[in-house]
Image (cartoon, grey):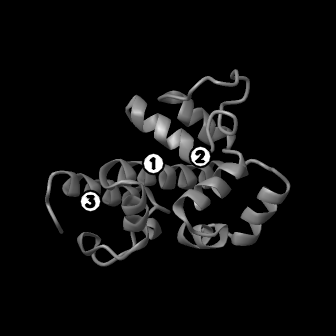
Amino acid sequence: MTGADAARVLAILGGKSVVRPRGSTPGSQPAGPAWTSIIREGLPSRALELTAGRLGVSVNELSKSLRLPSRTVHRRIEKRERLTPEESERSLRVARALARSQALLGDENGRAWLLEPCRGLGGAVPVTLLDTADGFEAVLDELGRLAHGVIG
């Protein structure tokens, strides 16, 4: 992930005040292995809530797409708990896919692209594929094809 990509992902997740490894100083930006550390520690649940808002869907809708128990996610948000590493990984995938699609298609079109059936993905809605690593790769591959003018 380039520095610009990391900055966009960080903004989607709520910025430096929300997302940072434990023990890091406010204002420091995660890069490379720091993302791994953040995932392992668990993203703040607020990051998932903010990501849903930036995607333009409810937390329930995003939880369903990511195959996360909605009640558990809401409880974590209410209690301001951290997400599990698995929940964090899926949340980060959404932020990364949103950042990439918006960088390529613009803010509104990039958001919309993730929420509409995509012919290049066999008619699947891209956000519903982000619950697995393979689905995430397929979404990024399709965005790569779009970037090179290959319409699927």
Instruction: Tell me which label, 3 or 2, sits earlier in the chain.
Output: 2
- Residue at 63% over, 67% down: 68
Instruction: Tell me which label, 3 or 1, sits earlier in the chain.
Output: 1
Q: Give the CA separation, mark 3 to mark 2.
A: 23 Å
The x and y percentages for residue 12 are 55, 47
- Amino acid type, residue under disc 3 in the picture: Glu
- Amino acid type, residue under disc 1 in the picture: Arg
- Which residue carries the number 3 mark? 142
Q: Is residue 48 left or right of residue 78?
A: left
The x and y percentages for residue 21 are 66, 30
Q: Quadrant of the C terminus?
A: bottom left
- Amino acid type, residue under disc 2 in the picture: Leu
Q: Residues within 10 Å of mark 2 (few under 14, many from 20)?
A: many
Q: Quadrant of the N terminus?
A: top left
SS assignment at label 1: helix
- Residue at 32% over, 54% down: 140
Relative height, residue 99 to residue 120 (above, below): above
Q: Give the CA separation, mark 3 to mark 1.
A: 14 Å
- Which residue carries the number 1 mark? 96
The x and y percentages for residue 42 are 67, 44
- Residue at 42% over, 55% down: 107
- Which residue carries the number 2 mark? 13
